[in-house]
Amino acid sequence: MPVTAPTVKDYARIRVAPLTGALGAEVSGVQLRDLDDETMAELHDAFLEHHVLFFRDQELSRDEHVAYGRRWGPLEQHPFTKNEAEHPEIVVLESTPERFIAAEEWHSDVTWRECPSLGSILRGLVIPPVGGDTCWANMELAYDQLTDAVKEKIEGKQAVHSFVKVFGARMSEEDREKKRQEFPDQLHPVVRTHPETGRRSIYVNRPFTMRIEGMEPEESERVLRLLYRQASVPQFQCRFRWQPGSVAQWDNRCTQHYAVPDFAGQHRRMERVTVEGDRPR
């Protein structure tokens, strides 16, 4: 089924140019370090419409990055990642020629939390000359285009989410169990309803989802594989080419993202703040 493409929209303060028919838009006419309430309201409207916003040529200090994130809500501190020493809200995502790191699986951030994030704001500092793009997928479209039979099968189902497959894999069994006491497995709906728009989306992802409750293991795995594949459908996606000073901001409640792992041997440094969210319903 074809996706209808949105059009460029001029607000009073900003211009919003869609990147694809599925999601994502570049916003111009704004510096994130200097915003009034009217501009914030326009950004909020564009955020709900396009799910991912992209900004070029942003001269943000770390203090300003944190301050902009707080305009959207309280910021979380990630317990398992490398964080910036003077700004513990900032997650440092850095790959070097000696140590390659990329989030090369489709996922939503921190779904293993009781209240996963509302969204993330990622800033590009060091960008390789070739490669290092990020892709996003609209999981509302992904849900809409499931068959009626699949929608019926997953209606009302909940899935178990845990940190253990990703962050727990490099811990000792003792440390993993201690962390599990602090961050116990969570049950979230397989189909989430967006708290602001009421739209429904697929809310499972390969790194953090363990199983669907109430299904036999083989059936759970089969259904999850089908749902995971929806993120990889091209017409549900957008792809962003980073430049130094670029910022991407995405709605973690209805998107998944993927760092394209095509920049080994190069330096790439990104910094992210993550806005606290609510419990999925």
Image (cartoon, rainbow, N blue to C red):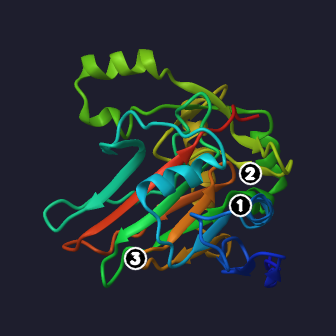
Quarter of the image with the N terminus in it: bottom right
| 95 left or right of 149 in image | left
Question: Which residue is identified by label 2?
Answer: 201
Q: Provide the secondary structure element on which disc 2 rests.
A: strand
| 200 left or right of 270 in image | right
The residue type indicated by label 2 comes to: Ser
Q: Which label sits in the foreground, 3 or 2?
A: 3
Q: Can you give x and y, in whole percent of width and height, for residue 103 in the image?
A: 39, 57
**Quarter of the figure with residue 23:** bottom right
Question: Which residue is identified by label 3?
Answer: 244
Q: Provide the secondary structure element on which disc 3 rests.
A: loop
Question: Which residue is identified by label 1?
Answer: 142
Q: Tell which of 212 and 182 is nearer to you.
A: 182
Name the N-terminal-most of marks 3 and 2.
2
| Contact flag, marks 3 and 2 (Cβ < 8 Å) | no
Work out whether 91 lies above or below 250: above
Q: Tell which of 208 and 214 is nearer to you.
A: 208
**Which residue is rendered at x = 58% and y = 57% of the image?**
256
Q: Tell which of 223 and 228 is nearer to you.
A: 228
**Quarter of the figure with residue 220:** top right
| Contact flag, marks 2 and 1 (Cβ < 8 Å) | yes
Quarter of the image with the C terminus in it: top right
**Which residue is rendered at x = 66% and y = 72% of the image?**
24
Work out whether 130 lies above or below 203: below
What's the distance in space between the residues labelled 3 and 2, CA to CA? Answer: 32 Å
What's the distance in space between the residues labelled 2 and 1, CA to CA? Answer: 7 Å
The residue type indicated by label 1 comes to: Ala
